[in-house]
Amino acid sequence: MNGTGPVWVKSTYSAGEGQCIEWAPTHATSTGIVPVRDSKDPSGPTLAFEPAAWNAFVAGVKAGDFGGA
């Protein structure tokens, strides 16, 4: 996403079965765009969210709005 690339962090909500996402908080802070990727496919596609949309998604996950596995 930039010349040196974002520093990726695995979600603290990731399951032990490999259902993991990563995001790049430093990149989000510096650009205002929240990049997200599948930790099982780090060279695959990256999604980009506006902070308000990402915050709404995280709040929904914490509230259990998306059900369980």
Image (tube, grey):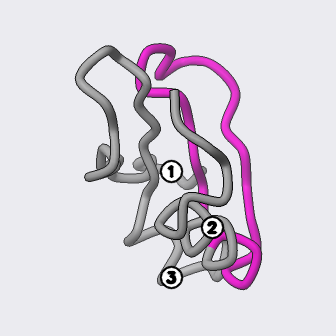
**What's the amino acid at mark 3?**
Ser
Q: Which mark is residue 60?
A: 2
Q: Count neighbours of disc 3 (C-alpha within 10 A) and say few if under 14, some if 14 to 19, many if 20 or more.
A: few
Q: Tell me whether the residue at label 2 lies in contact with that at label 1, contact meaning CB atoms closer than 8 angstroms.
A: no
- Kindly identify which residue carries mark 1: 3
Q: Is residue 52 magenta?
A: yes
Q: Tell me whether the residue at label 3 lies in contact with that at label 1, contact meaning CB atoms closer than 8 angstroms.
A: no
Q: Secondary structure at mark 1?
A: loop
- Kindly identify which residue carries mark 3: 30
Q: Secondary structure at mark 2?
A: helix
Between circles 2 and 3, the one closer to the viewer is 2
N-terminal of the pair, mark 2 or mark 3, is 3
Q: In the visual, does 66 lie left or right of 38?
A: right
Q: Which residues are magenta?
A: 34-54
**Image spot of residue 52 (x, y percent):** 72, 84
Q: Count neighbours of disc 2 (C-alpha within 10 A) and say few if under 14, some if 14 to 19, many if 20 or more.
A: few
- Looking at the picture, tell me which residue is in the foreground, 45 or 20: 20
